[in-house]
Image (cartoon, helix red, strand yellow):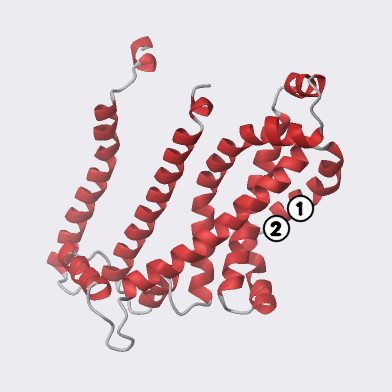
Amino acid sequence: MRKIINYQPQPMTRVLMGALPLIAVIFFYLVASDARLAANSYDKLLPGFDAMWAAIDRMAFTPSPRTGEYLFWTDSAASLLRLLVGVGLSAFLALVFGLFCGALPVVRSVLSPLITLIALIPPLAILPVLFITFGLGEVSKVVLIVIGITPFIVRDLQLQVQAIPHEQMVKAQTLGGHSAQILWRVVLPQLLPRLIDAVRLSLCSAWLFLIAAEAIAATEGLGYRIFLMRRYMAMDVILPYVAWITLLAFTLDLLLRVINRRCFPWYYAK
């Protein structure tokens, strides 16, 4: 048993082991799809890969007869723009509030209770309020993402700042550093890699809020298209869209992880 807990798979072995569950899911889907289609060739619940590929070809590579747009790419661009703007604003606000709340007890005493209160509000519960306040356009969707993930990133960064050894602050002050220099030269560099990690962990929630907003009020977007196709039980469109969202989320997560490792190698050497 001691050998098992100390076993470290090689990189290629880890890739193969990680691929096994995905292969198993695809295999069981194919078996279940074949069984349902054999019983009813018009079954829509588990379409075959050929039907899904035909749907992808229709959505991604054939212009819409009504608008002339390639709907798949139009939806992807609209959702990604909303997501990146929302997450970017959240990261900036979280960095500012997390830095000052964590490093300055006076600011923490004033703002920390408010941030905690906002974090406890279910973001989807105030979605109608956002639509009434900001309209049904892009602003309300971006604001929902910001409200949904910013408080959690702020609290994470605040804890990270408070975990910095107090000796570092004392040494910086001994060397003549004032408050602004300590924040800029001591605290901020240690906060940036944690910010990227916190954003990575918040991406799933950001996608959730985005898709919910698009499902209620949008004319384009991945969430809008999924809920539109639900009316027609078009699983041959819905499943590829879900898989595409998963691939986009995985790519963004991987990109952030690579950026973090390249820019802050010392963070992973701890």
Q: Identify which amino acid the numbered label 2 is placed on.
A: Ile
Which SS class for mark 2?
loop
Q: Residue at x 73, y 55 (%)?
A: 118
| Residue 166, percent from left and from top | 76, 22
Q: Residue at x 33, y 70 (%)?
A: 73
Q: Quadrant of residue 174?
A: top right
Q: Residue at x 40, y 43 (%)?
A: 254
- Quick check: 210 left or right of 114? left
> How many discs appear?
2
Image mark for residue 5: none
Q: Residue at x 15, y 60 (%)?
A: 34
Compared to 228, does 4 lie above or below?
above
Compared to 197, does 81 lie above or below?
below
As rendered, which of 35 and 178 lies closer to the eye? 178
- Quick check: 10 left or right of 141? left
CB within 8 Å, label 1 to label 2: yes
**Quadrant into which the N terminus falls:** top left
As rendered, which of 171 and 160 lies closer to the eye? 171
Q: Quadrant of residue 255?
A: top left
| Residue 202, percent from left and from top | 54, 49
Q: Identify which amino acid the numbered label 1 is placed on.
A: Leu
| Residue 136, percent from left and from top | 58, 79
According to the image, label 2 marks what residue?
Answer: 121
| Outermost residue, top side | 2
Which SS class for mark 1?
helix
- Quick check: 204 left or right of 177? left
| Residue 68, percent from left and from top | 30, 84
Q: Residues within 10 Å of mark 2 (few under 14, many from 20)?
A: few
Image mark for residue 117: 1
